[in-house]
Amino acid sequence: MNIPYQTETWLQGIPISAGKAMAKICLFNEARHANLPVYQVSGEGLDRECSRLNSAIQRTADQLAVLHQDVARRIGKAEAEIFSAQIMILQDVSLRQKMTDAIRVAGHNAEMAVALVLEVAEARLMKVDNEYIQDRATDIGEIKRRLLDALGNLNPALQCAGQPHCQKGRQRVVVAEELTPTLTLQLDTAHTRGFVTERGGKTSHAAILARALGIPAVTGIKGVHAALTCGTDLLINGDTGEVVVWPSAATVRAMLGHEGKAARPAGTAVAPVPGFHVMANITLTSDVPEALAMGAEGIGLYRTEFEFFAAGHLLTEDEQVDRYVSVVRQMAGKPVTIRLLDVGGDKAAPYFEIPPEQNPCLGFRGSRLLLARPELLNTQARALARASKEGPIRVLYPMIIDVEQFVALKRRFGQAIETIDAGELTHGAMFETPSACLLARELLTASDFASVGTNDLIQYLFAVDRNNESVAYDYSPDRPVFWELLALIVRHARELNRPLSICGEIAGDPQYVRQLKSVGVTTVSASARLIAGVRRAAAMDTPASTKTE
């Protein structure tokens, strides 16, 4: 990759954490293990190297335990489980034995034993044609780096070449080959503006942490780390995956507004706009305080699958109850919409036991998976029913294709909770497929409410992979047919008096507020950090006579 000095250059990556940021960059030092000590050992040297390895493993385990406690305190228990998973990898008997054998049998020093064994394990996972499994390879890689740091008494570092004082990411966009949980957390994240990386998927632990911390992040830009120098001006859009190197003043204004500044999640809340309701999307219980701080009028979409990804295992009924109750209590009577597990496609994990598919986005996912895996549906249904005793819950059914599928799921949900003393539960369908949209009247008749998931709807309506940068130009709502379809759903919802909300990227994009209002949309749901911008746009488009002082 060749990027001319101080010449505006646009790059396209994959968005993994929403938001926009403009700042100079800091480069993460990826080369600290480039010159590993390599030597053969024998005799007493074998015991010495094994002792060094065991000591490094113990030190690393202690570090991870401290990180676990810190993350649990700062962010949440679910996110802290990331480091429990790494401790389990570190304590894996098979991996430890292989490293020991590399010393005692092959005569390698400890550094070489660690590198050889863990690089093989990491490479094996990277070859699996599954994004979730590939993201777990990141954990193996991070364990390797931690052990090598412990063996060499090294510290991960940012490199500020040519500058007298390293900014350590403060008020900077951090650029790295890979976004790891350690890198995400070792910085002063309250002042880190964003992340840009070459690899690391949407379900990676670090991406989950970036979203929980409210830091915009873009991945999938090959060669970007080597192509940039510390101090380069960078503009990133975590909503679209766009990255602009040396952006012009006009580009900055176009992307960030007249002030040319990116709003951080902890920005000033904006008062609700009469007749236009803005709720919050959340992925973890720890997102709720930010949603409340930004004045969200409810939770419009709680993506429960991310609680499972953060924990790294199938959550039990009690574990799910704890999370759902926490959200309902914190919202204190405001609407709470909880989506049933939406896994499959680009969101998978080994513990869901989804078989390999040639085209997973068109395969075993969403409601199809829930119907085929009653143990997943039943456990979540019981947990939601128990949590509803704390306050009303709106249950949202993902990836519905027709009325029969929705009714079947709703019936099975009811059967699962027959013996539970539940509170108020209402049931709604998601409009994400063209077939569901064309059956809008029938589906809305069978539902208590509904939500339009614009991300998947755009993908399926225009037959475009939203994660494929080669066809990114076709992933856009800027076509009349999309708005005609949305207007159809809104019209039927009004006629049947069914609450309808819009979620997805356009719900949080101020440039689409006027169009949404023009087709009759009155409720949207967006990431908490985007609520203020949406409300400002809605207020500008509201007649003065209807505004409150």
Image (cartoon, rainbow, N blue to C red):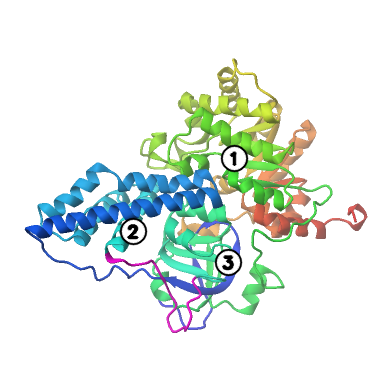
The earlier-in-sequence mark between 2 and 3 is: 2
Residue under the point 64% across and 39% down: 327
Foreground pick, 518 / 1 = 1
Quadrant of the image occupied by residue 428: top right
Percent position (x, y) of residue 339? Answer: 59, 36
Specify the amino acid type for callout 2. Answer: Arg
Mark 1 and mark 2 in contact (Cβ < 8 Å)?
A: no
Percent position (x, y) of residue 268? Answer: 73, 60
Give the quarter of the figure containing the C terminus.
Answer: bottom right
* Extent of the magenta region: 152-168
Residue holding disc 1: 434
Magenta stretch holds residue 157: yes
Mark 2 element type: helix
Mark 1 and mark 3 in contact (Cβ < 8 Å)?
A: no
Left or right of residue 103, residue 473 in this image: right
Q: Nearer the viewer, mark 2 or mark 1?
A: 2
Give the quarter of the figure containing the N terminus.
Answer: bottom left
Mark 3 element type: loop
In this orientation, does residue 546 appear? yes
Residue holding disc 3: 191
Give the main secondary structure of the magenta stretch.
loop
Mark 1 element type: helix
Residue under the point 49% across and 71% down: 168
User: Callout 2: few (<14), some (14-19), or many (20+) C-alpha neighbours within 10 Å?
Assistant: many
- The residues tagged by marks 3 and 1 sit, at their Cα atoms, a distance apart of 42 Å
The earlier-in-sequence mark between 3 and 1 is: 3
Residue holding disc 2: 146
